[in-house]
Amino acid sequence: MVSRNIVKIDEEKCNGCGFCVIACAEGAIKLIGGKAKLISESYCDGLGACIGHCPQDAISIEQRESAPFDEQATKSHPAQEQIDARERSDHHTSAGLMCYFVCPSSVAKQLRQKPVLRSAAQARGAESTGSEQVVAETLSRLSHWPVQLRLVSPNAPYFAQADLLLVADCVPFAMGDFHSRILKGRSIAVGCPKFADAVFYIEKLSAILKANKLKSLTVVHMEVPCCFGLTRIAREAIASSGVNVSSDDVTVDLRGNISKVETIEVRA
């Protein structure tokens, strides 16, 4: 054991966003039970690269007796798999434009919906009596494809001068009226801040902001702690792009109700 600098994580403050996991080049930090934990003192170099990436100020550096840093061990432990995955993601980022042209899932399409008319009896799954009133089914308000932030092209025509939604992918499942209340008349990019590469998301959203004169950016996420990472992604992307855009942050509770709407403040 030696006395040296080592990372300390305050679990009470940690919201499980995972940004520190991405920032730690040695793979010393892992999300366990929704909280960031130092998996081994010998994997931590004590330099604190993760501190500036924590939105909750949950990470600090303290000097204490601990196992010495083992650089060789960091190259072979299981957490290194996530570092390799991030490097593969970076490779895909640089080759991303090629994907837009060769991947069928990424081909940009603008969609125009037509109402589907059925009788009220058909809507209920019953036999028609011949005198039923004709009703229109609920319309999809999706105006383009693809929708995943990882797949969309920053230069796609549906982003030009658009009102853009950045939506956590659980939101449409919680909100029964998502299409009519939130999506109508807007372009959308969907992602999960907990399981995806936050750095990639920031870079992609920044590229969208730079390439398009967006009318507005609205971030919509669930009330669970990890989902607030989407707000931080948006804030950092706006700051990185240098674009001044009207931005709102919408929080949705687990019953699908909008519980809070705030303006996203970006520090200069």
Image: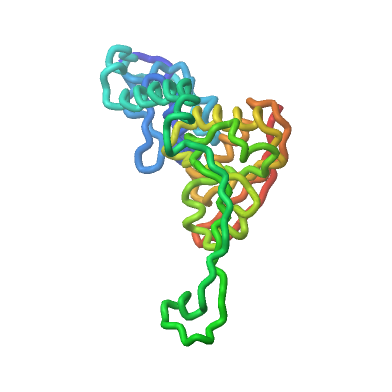
Q: Give me the residue at 41% from left, 35% from top.
A: 36
- Assign the N terminus to one quadrant of the image: top left
Percent of width and height locating residue 210:
66, 28
Percent of width and height locating residue 109:
54, 42
Can residue 164 be seen here? The reply is: yes
* Colour logic: rainbow
Q: Give me the residue at 27% from left, 16% from top.
A: 73
Q: Is residue 44 left or right of residue 52?
A: left
Q: Give me the residue at 48% from left, 35% from top.
A: 151
Q: How many marks?
A: 0
Q: Nearer the viewer, residue 204 or 199?
A: 204
Q: Quadrant of residue 65?
A: top left
Percent of width and height locating residue 33:
36, 43
Percent of width and height locating residue 49:
48, 20
Q: Nearer the viewer, residue 245 or 258?
A: 245
Q: Give me the residue at 51% from left, 73% from top.
A: 118
Vertical position of residue 150 compared to residue 127: above or below: above
As drawn, which residue projects farthest toward the front? Answer: 130
Q: Nearer the viewer, residue 155 or 213?
A: 155
Vertical position of residue 263 compared to residue 69: above or below: below
- Assign the C terminus to one quadrant of the image: top right
